Amino acid sequence: MRIHGGARIGVLFAWLIAFGLTGVTAAWADETCNSPYIAKLIKGQEDYVYVWALGVDGVGDGSDKLVTVDVNPKSKTYGKVLGSASVGGRGEAHHMGFTDDRRFLWAGGLSDSKIYVFDIGTDPGKPKLVQTIVDLTERTGYVGPHTYYALPGRMLVQTLSNAKDKGGVTGMALYNNKGEFIAAYPMPTDGGGDGYGYDLAVNPKKNVLLTSSFAGYANYMRPLGEVVNDPEAMKRFGNTMVLWDLKALKPKKIFAVPGAPLEIRWSPKAGDNWAVAATALTSKIWLVKQDGSGEWQAKDVATIGDPAKIPLPVDISITRDGKGLWVNTFMDGTTRYFDLSTPAAPKQTYAKVTGKQVNMISQSWDGKRVYITSSLLANWDKGGADNEQFLRGFAWDGRELKQVFEVDFTKEQLGRAHHMKLGSRALRSS
């Protein structure tokens, strides 16, 4: 994120005020955050962290790649890179997701809209690129595939933009596990909908799908300094979440959630039927749940850091019991923990600076291991000495995060470290 000095931060905050995004009025990948249709959860020690990394010109082969890191403390190669699978080009590598059988990992690029399918079942320690899906834009008119979410035998892909004007109006694409296109579903633009998309997550028992919203290609592919100095661009961020009928894939209700709501996390605890999301521009935690009459509502329930300083909340990770939430804030490089024992009143109980810039955060099922990566977007990452690119592993004892290893992606000539997924030798396909 190339914003330097107080002047530009001041400009960003001024625009947030101008467009009502300061949040002063009351109002993104691990075992606990996988699709509920993925049956093979790793409830013991994971062996691998797969990192989807952005290629950097002049760094290694310069291409986007899936990097496999050994994270089993009993291994002789603990904390080391085991290998990488390059896709032979740069397309703004971003997020990825498992198929329901966990044999394949879908990953994609925000700029070229290609979707790459890696076989992780044949040999979990050596993922192999086996398919490239290139028909997303042709079939749907959408660009910027972001979230890959497993449904039974299918993958639901949330996109960020469209090919017509590169704005934020977009939709979802449904594929089967073979990579064959099935249908497209536009994000609603009436009834208060802004048509924007970002993340999606489902609660099968309640037959609901939740989606969130961010910005289009014209914003996310520009340097952030340019975006915040462009008043029209600052108007083009999502301010809604949408509740869908999961089976019919039709929107049912639109929530006003100002400030770009990003990652969505349903509580994994049996019996819990609520979800949380964090807004990037207003630094808020929102709770989505049913009220006493059964009507779904969205409510701002907590503040993350000091919104005036624009900490920029990015990824969040919920604990398996639904009682805790990790939040990474990119600008100040801080990892925060919130007590969610009372979901309607989260309380921050811990904070630690874990990097000069931090983005994604993933945790093991038992909550004892936490992994953090650094890159947000190629044109939004910080510059100079602040442009750290890493995977860092931490041990968490409920009181303190202790770093136990680091992989320096620049030193290892691997590029920018973005999204993570966990792997295990025990998941080798028979």
Image (cartoon, rainbow, N blue to C red):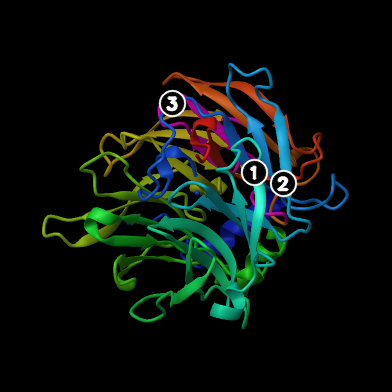
Residue 101 vs residue 328: left or right? left
Residue 191 vs residue 420: left or right? left
Nearest the viewer among 393 and 189 is: 393
Residue 275: percent from left, percent from top: 32, 50
Can you identify the residue that label 2 sits on? 85
Residue 220: percent from left, percent from top: 64, 63
Farthest left residue in view? 293
Residue appearing at x 60%, y 31% in the figure: 354
Q: Which mark is residue 127?
A: 1
Amino acid residing under circle 1: Pro
Can you identify the residue that label 3 sits on? 44
Residue 293 vs residue 327: left or right? left
Dot 1 or dot 3: first in sequence order is 3
Q: Which residues are magenta?
A: 353-378
Q: Is residue 372 magenta?
A: yes
Q: Is residue 87 magenta?
A: no
Instruction: Say few, some or many: other residues with alpha carbon within 10 Å of mark 3 (under 14 / 14 to 19 / 20 or more).
Output: few
**In which quadrant of the rendered view does residue 325 lie?**
top left
Asked if disc 1 and disc 3 are in contact, CB closer than 8 Å, the reply is no
Farthest front residue in view? 430
Residue 264 in view, yes or no = yes
SS category of the residue bearing label 2: strand
SS category of the residue bearing label 1: loop
Above or below for 233 versus 373: below
Nearest the viewer among 59 and 74 is: 74
Asked if disc 1 and disc 2 are in contact, CB closer than 8 Å, the reply is yes
Mark in front: 1 vs 3: 1
**In which quadrant of the rendered view does residue 303 lie?**
top left
Farthest right residue in view? 58
SS category of the residue bearing label 3: loop
Amino acid residing under circle 3: Gly
